[in-house]
Image (cartoon, coloured by chain):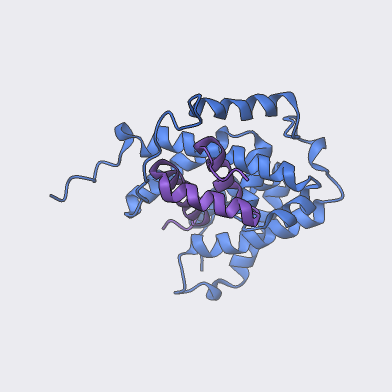
Amino acid sequence: MKIRLHCRHAHRLAIESMDRALSWRERVRLRLHLVACDRCSSFVQEIGVLRRTVRQWGQED
Amino acid sequence: MIDAETLRTLRGQLVKFARIQLRNDAWADDVVQETLVALVEAPERFAGRSSLKTYSIGILKHKILDALRAGRREVPLSTFERDDGEAGGASEQEDLLSFDSLFDHTGHWRDAPRDWNEPDTQLQRKQFFEILELCVDKLPPKVARIFMMREWLGLDTEEICKELGITSTNAWVMLYRARMRLRECLQLNWFGESAAPAVTTSTS
């Protein structure tokens, strides 16, 4: 099977992993991509900040 | 005892959240009213535990959930929202395609994402949430609503699909759009270099 992911596909999987359980195959492909790709790792960090901040929205003071 | 001025300010803040979620001003006013009544009736509950606003947001979330559940049968999503978020709709396809321009023909990022610094001081946080609010307002109402149900109310996609009568694929697509649009908007208006908070280098 094709293991290698491009960023175009990886970023989508990264987002979907926030809302659904990825298949085993998807998880492996995403993880391998993230190990090698700083850009997508930063993207994951960004959407993580988005998630954490929205959860605190309204409780900022 | 909570004074009238405090209640008025609080009311305005709560209404904002309720409207994003319920898409119906009358319902929004109702849940906010119920929240304020709960506050006024038992003001001792929040004393010392958290700020009044934090405490009331907690109550409001419960009231919104109740309202969503009660309203499920009466007002299906499609009857009061014009923007068609169904997967496969023309505008939906165009919107999803527009994210393709983030990548070059080899499938790599054109502009590299960079790690974001979370706003940490009170002032930064206040300003950040003002920008976030503007960004959420720019989303199609249906997309904003689902995003807030997922991330702010903390529902899982299964519950969201049940409340709104949509498929899970549809929900994932809308959540994807919401995250991509918000990321773009925040990058532009908050995390981008020109908008970087002024405090970053002042400590040296």
**Vertical arrangement, residue A50 with respect to residue B87, above or below:** below
Chain (purple): A
Q: Position of residue A30 (x, y in %)?
A: 53, 49
Q: Residue at x 65, y 63 (%)?
A: B37
**Residue B30 seen by the camera:** yes
Residue B128 in the figure: left or right of residue B182: left
| Quarter of the figure with residue B188 | top left
Which residue is the extreme one toward the front? A1
Which residue is the extreme one toward the left? B204
Q: Colour of chain B?
A: blue
Q: Position of residue B200 (x, y in %)?
A: 23, 45
**Vertical arrangement, residue B160 with respect to residue A12, above or below:** below
Residue A5 in the figure: left or right of residue B194: right
Q: Residue at x 61, y 41 (%)?
A: B176
Q: Residue at x 55, y 28 (%)?
A: B100
Residue A12 in the figure: left or right of residue B171: left
Q: Residue at x 46, y 69 (%)?
A: B50
Residue B83 in the figure: left or right of residue A8: right
**Residue A17 seen by the camera:** no
**Vertical arrangement, residue A46 with respect to residue B158, above or below:** above
Q: Position of residue A7 (x, y in %)?
A: 50, 38
